[in-house]
Image (tube, grey):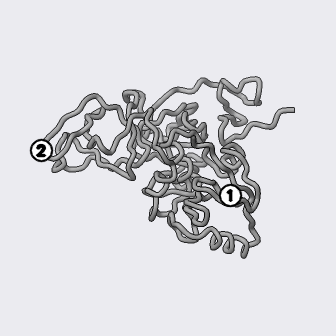
C-alpha cells in the first residue's frame, strides 16, 4: 500500500485538487494549474490566505508557480515549481507576463537600478536566489550592468547564469552569517535552518526539499553515529538542521541566537540535550 501524499508538496483539499492527482486523492473538483511568475523580490507562501497566517516558505523573484485558485480577496492557492511546496500567496505578487529567467542573484543581496547608473534611486533590493531575465549589457564609468526585464539594471558581478554552480555550497551558506532568524525565510535577509540549507545547496546545483524532515530523509547518505564529521555534513535534530564547517564547527540558522551563527557542535549538542533532544541523524552529500 502506497504512503499517503504529503499535502505540503501535493495540491489537494477536500473541495479542490491538482488535476494531476485525479485518481490518487478524493476532491470535489480537479483543476489544471495556471503557470505564473513571482514578480516581487520576496513573496511569502503562507499556511492560510491571510496576511497574519504563518509563513511556511518564500518564493523569490522570477520563480514559477502553478495557481490553482484565486480569490476575490487577493489570495491565491499555489504550488511552487521549484520544490513543490503548496500554500497561499498574494495574487498581486504574481505575473503572467514576465520573460523567462536567465540568471540569478549569487550574492547576499543586490540592487535593481532603473537604468545603468549607480547614482539613480534604487528600484528594489533583490535577495540571493532571485531570478531575472537578462536581455543585454551596458556600461558607464562605474560598472557594467545586466539589463533585466521588464525595466532595470543589475551589476553583472552579482549575477550568475541559471546553469552555473557554486563550487562549494558551504561557502554559499557562510554568506548567511549574521542573517536574522526568520521562520519560513530562505535568504540572507532572513532565514530558518532548512531554508539556509535549501538555498545554499540550490546555488551549488543540488536540488533540496524545503523542510528538515524531508531533507533528512532525502539528502545524501547516513553517517554512522560518532563518526568524524566532515565539511558539508548535515546534522539533524527533530525540526532542526545545521551544516558542519569542519570536524568541530556547526553553521546554522537558529532561534537560540535568533540568527545564523557558527558555534562548536558540542555546544549545540549540549543545549539540545538539556531539553531532552538528541541528534536524529547526520547526512553526507556526494559533492564530487
Q: Residue at x 60, y 48 (%)?
A: 47
Q: Residue at x 52, y 68 (%)?
A: 258
Question: Can residue 210 be seen in this snapshot?
Answer: yes
Q: Is residue 235 left or right of residue 81?
A: right
Point out the image quarter for the C terminus.
Answer: top right
Name the residue nearer the viewer: 253 or 201: 201
Quadrant of res 152: top left
Q: Residue furthest right?
A: 1
Quadrant of res 102: top left
Q: Residue at x 66, y 49 (%)?
A: 284
Q: Is residue 100 above or below residue 214?
A: above
Q: Earlier in the sequence, mark 2 or mark 1?
A: 2
Q: Position of residue 25 (x, y in %)?
A: 76, 30
Q: Position of residue 63 (x, y in %)?
A: 46, 36
Q: Position of residue 29 (x, y in %)?
A: 68, 26
Q: Is residue 226 left or right of residue 268?
A: right
Q: Is residue 178 above or below residue 56?
A: below
Question: Can residue 54 be seen in this snapshot?
Answer: no
Q: CA distance from mark 2 to mark 1?
A: 49 Å
Name the residue nearer the viewer: 23 or 115: 115
Look at mark 1 in the image and give the residue it sits on.
Answer: 236
Name the residue nearer the viewer: 105 or 232: 232
Point out the image quarter for the N terminus.
Answer: top right
Q: Is residue 30 above or below residue 57?
A: above
**Category of crowding for the residue at label 2, using alpha-carbon neighbours closer than 10 angstroms: few (below 14), some (14–19), many (at least 20):** few
Indicate the secondary structure of the residue bearing disc 1: strand
**Category of crowding for the residue at label 1, using alpha-carbon neighbours closer than 10 angstroms: few (below 14), some (14–19), many (at least 20):** many
Quadrant of res 159: top left
Look at mark 2 in the image and give the residue it sits on.
Answer: 141
Q: Position of residue 252 (x, y in %)?
A: 56, 61
Amino acid at each position: 500500500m502506497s504512503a499517503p501524499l504529503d499535502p505540503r508538496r501535493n495540491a489537494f483539499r477536500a473541495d479542490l485538487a491538482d488535476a494531476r492527482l485525479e485518481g490518487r486523492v478524493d476532491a470535489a473538483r480537479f483543476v489544471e494549474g495556471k503557470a505564473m511568475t513571482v514578480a516581487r523580490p520576496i513573496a511569502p507562501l503562507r499556511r492560510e490566505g491571510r496576511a497574519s497566517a504563518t509563513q511556511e516558505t518564500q518564493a523569490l523573484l522570477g520563480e514559477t508557480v502553478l495557481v490553482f485558485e484565486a480569490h476575490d480577496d487577493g489570495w491565491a492557492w499555489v504550488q511552487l515549481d521549484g520544490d513543490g511546496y503548496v500554500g497561499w500567496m498574494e495574487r498581486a505578487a504574481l505575473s503572467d507576463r514576465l520573460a523567462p529567467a536567465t540568471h540569478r542573484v549569487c550574492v547576499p543581496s543586490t540592487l535593481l537600478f532603473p537604468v545603468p547608473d549607480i547614482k539613480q534611486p534604487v528600484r528594489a533590493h533583490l535577495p540571493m536566489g532571485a531570478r531575472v531575465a537578462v536581455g543585454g549589457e551596458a556600461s558607464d564609468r562605474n560598472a557594467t550592468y545586466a539589463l533585466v526585464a521588464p525595466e532595470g539594471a543589475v551589476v553583472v558581478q552579482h549575477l550568475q547564469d541559471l546553469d552555473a554552480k557554486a563550487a562549494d555550497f558551504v561557502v554559499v551558506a557562510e554568506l548567511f552569517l549574521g542573517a536574522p532568524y526568520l521562520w519560513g525565510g530562505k535568504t540572507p535577509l532572513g532565514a530558518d535552518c532548512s531554508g539556509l540549507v535549501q538555498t545554499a545547496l540550490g546555488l551549488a546545483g543540488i536540488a533540496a526539499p524545503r523542510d528538515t524532515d524531508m531533507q533528512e530523509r532525502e539528502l545524501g547518505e547516513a553517517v554512522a553515529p560518532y563518526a568524524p564529521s566532515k565539511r558539508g555534513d548535515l546534522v539533524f535534530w527533530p525540526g532542526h538542521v545545521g551544516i558542519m564547517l569542519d570536524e568541530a564547527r556547526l553553521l546554522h540558522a537558529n532561534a537560540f541566537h535568533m540568527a545564523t551563527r557558527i558555534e562548536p557542535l558540542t555546544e549545540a549538542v549540549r543545549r539540545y540535550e538539556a531539553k531532552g533532544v538528541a541528534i536524529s541523524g547526520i547526512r553526507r552529500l556526494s559533492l564530487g
